[in-house]
Image: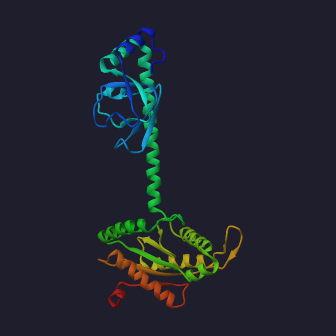
Amino acid sequence: MLEGVGLTARRELLATAARRVLAPGEVLIEQGKRHARMFLLLRGALSVHLDSPTADPVATIEAGETVGELSLLDGSEASAFVVAKEKARLLEVGEDAFWQLTNVSHAFAVNLLVKTAARLRANNATVSQNVQKRRQYERAAMFDGLTGIHNRRWLDETLSRMVRRHQGERGKLSLSLIDIDHFKSFNDTYGHAAGDHVLTVVASTLSGNLRPTDLVARFGGEEFVIIFPDTDVELAQVAAERVREAISKEKLAMPDGTELPSVTISMGVSQLADGQSVPELLKVADMAMYRAKQAGRNRVMVGDASDLEGA
């Protein structure tokens, strides 16, 4: 901070600045309080902490650096705790001496601007990184880590929202509940790596054989759900047959070239009825899927709201 500052100005600063020695762990600046002083670290190191002096440090201040000048510039309270990381020696510059040095030394004023600009850039970079991390966390929370398609959490939120909208608008909404046939036996015979590969292939094939407006999610385990917006059960059945056939024809092989037997899926299709809830819509599809399995698997069955009456 004193780089380029004239000898006379330096002498005046040294004459008025107080010397301080901090023991390791001693708090220099307390968050939430105004400290009308700038500190120049001569020896040792300081650490910056948020929330409490004992929290994990977010930054380190080395010898030759300053701290506290931002509170002098804008009169604000300290936004963090500054603690002696080890034994530290400092110069304490009071408010009057700080502004006097700013007025008489062009070099000091320039250094102050440069340091402030550097902090702003660093803060902007931190904000950008935090935004990117938040987006990554949000994506991780809504997508299945194995298959890359939407997960159960996303499905629950999206389906609830779509059901409310279609009930209010009296629109058509259908869905299909899907289960990979004999998946447990497949896993036991060929191993979990092969089972995971099948799940990713099925998810990819489902996604690749749907309309742009259709939505697919992993329901859990070897089960998937397709949402057909603005679609009646007849058209949903046609779409379901298309994806069922595509999966039955899919040739499977591990990344190392090891061939695997093809798999099939059983599907239950249901259409949202007036006043029907999300669990009821899924229950109708689940009952239809169960009938598809009872009928020999590798087929599509259509359910109806009346199926719930005998359930």
Q: Position of residue 178 (x, y in %)?
A: 49, 78
Name above or below for residue 308 compared with residue 255.
below
Number of disc labels: 0
- Determine if residue 116 is in view: no
Q: Residue at x 41, y 66 (%)?
A: 153
Residue placed farthest to the right in the image?
A: 257
Q: In the rendered view, does 145 fall on the left or right side of 103?
A: right
Q: In the rendered view, does 310 fall on the left or right side of 260?
A: left
Q: How is the image coloured?
A: rainbow
Q: Where's the C terminus, which quadrant?
A: bottom left
Q: Position of residue 105 (x, y in %)?
A: 41, 13
Q: Residue at x 33, y 37 (%)?
A: 79
Q: Position of residue 256 (x, y in %)?
A: 71, 68
Q: Position of residue 240 (x, y in %)?
A: 51, 77
Question: Quick one: 105 or 284, which is closer to the camera?
Answer: 105
Name above or below for residue 202 compared with residue 100.
below
Q: In the rendered view, does 116 fall on the left or right side of 205?
A: left
The quadrant in which residue 113 appears is top left
Name above or below for residue 23 compared with residue 303.
above
